[in-house]
Image (cartoon, rainbow, N blue to C red):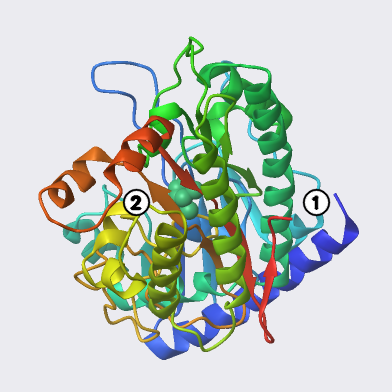
Amino acid sequence: MSETLHRQHIDHIHGLQSAYEDLLDRLGLDTVAIYSGHGQPHYGDDQFPNFQAFGHFIHWAPLTNAQHSWVVIQKSQRPQLYLYAPSDFWHLPTHLPEEPWVNEFDVHLSTDTIHPTLQGRAAIIGDTEWLTPEIAAKLNVKSQPESLEKALDELRLYKSPYEITCLREANRLALAGHQAAQAAFIGASGELDIQLAYLAASRQRESDVPYQNIIGLNSHAGVLHYQYYDLGVPKQRYSLLVDAGRRFRGYCADITRTYAGPDAPTQFGELVTAIHALKDKLIKSVMPGVGFLTLHEEMHRHLADVLVAHDLFKGTVEHAVSEGVTRAFCPHGLGHSLGLQVHDVAGLRHPDGTPAPAPEHHPALRLTRTLRPGMVITIEPGLYFINMLLAPLRKTDLPINWKLVDQLSLCGGIRIEDNVVVTEKGFTNLTR
Ligand code: GLY
Ligand code: MN
Ligand code: MN
């Protein structure tokens, strides 16, 4: 691990300490305790689903698997890390990495699931289902105060240099997976084998992915969150859509690529190229002060250009947008905030924590914020042939080229997605 990363990590912790202290002042608190969470077995079983520690916990300590553990922050004191380390010969004992950030904490290893003693006016955040209002009153703590949660989410929206380094590394590793997935597709692999090639090249086990990889061949490329991996290889290979990421120290990459296969109509390959260009054009508009909703609407206008230029819509660009044609071809938002969660927090709030919901016409948009330096977002335009969404348009006299739509339906759809940092002057694309 590079020295720069370790130095940046320590600066990140110091920055968090000062931001938390300001917040404690503002909210009249002395202590905030963040619970990492813990897993529950499947109902009636002794097996557990994958565990992922709470984002605000990993924000301090990159221990993504730490269960029953706490970070406790108080003013003018070093952060405290209470790490659950049971005496358990069934599993590998908990251990801390030998990295400089650990020295920034007072570390308390605990073989039991004890709760830290909290000083003064204290608040607890995290998945603490045991913390009933009665227990909270007895411990004299506030449980999940909304104002604190909102303020901490707001803090997460702006990434420190350490976090951007992590997101860049997550992208580098994910891109190696994407190259291997493309090669596997060229080699006529099926969905499961493409997935396995992706995991191997991006050096991760499936339980560590930031979201379930979407690996869709042919019409499956048009299922937005396609959730299976077919074992076989289809006879015809029209298309492949790979939406797959990687975590690095908890931080997520979220990258999509689409490829035309040997059996695709030529128009599909041309549309893939057009959506790549659309993604690049939209990224060039990323800069401080730009509203993400404005960018999303820009995507719809450019998508209408693509529909008209490629003979899918035989009317005007304005008509394609105003009649909702582009929304039927692309029902999701242009992108979202990215960080410790793939769909990161605070995207649908104003800076003061009040709601900033998606507009009625664009209900799937996950980010309505004005872009500011330090935000990291995805830009992911798409163009899909989804029967369920196009069927109502078939009943209208809108000048849609249904013959071409039907031919392209075999290819499912296209999405191209990069991860972008908003900088003081514009943007940096991490997916390079
Ligand atoms: N991979 C999920 C998304 O792109 O939002
Ligand atoms: Mn995304
Ligand atoms: Mn994605």
* Quadrant of the drawing holding the C terminus: bottom right
Return the mark for residue 253. none
Amino acid, disc 2: Asp
**Residue at left offset 26%, top offset 73%:** 357
Q: Is mark 2 within 8 Å of ligand 1?
A: no
Quadrant for residue 279, please give it: bottom right
Position of 137 with respect to 118 (left or right) is left
Distance between the Cα atoms at labels 2 and 1? 27 Å
Q: Is residue 332 visible?
A: yes
Q: Which residue is mark 2?
A: 127
> Residue 272 placed where, x, y %?
55, 47
Badge 1: residue crowd in 10 Å (few <14, some 14–19, many ≥20): few
Residue at far right of view: 3
> Residue 153 placed where, x, y %?
43, 70
**Front one among 131 and 355:** 355
**Residue at left offset 31%, top offset 55%:** 331
Residue at far left of view: 395
User: Counting residues from the N terminus, which is met first, the one under dot 2 or under dot 1?
Assistant: 1
> Residue 18 placed where, x, y %?
61, 82
Q: Which residue is mark 1?
A: 99
Q: Does 275 appear above or below 262?
A: below
Q: Is mark 1 within 8 Å of ligand 1?
A: no
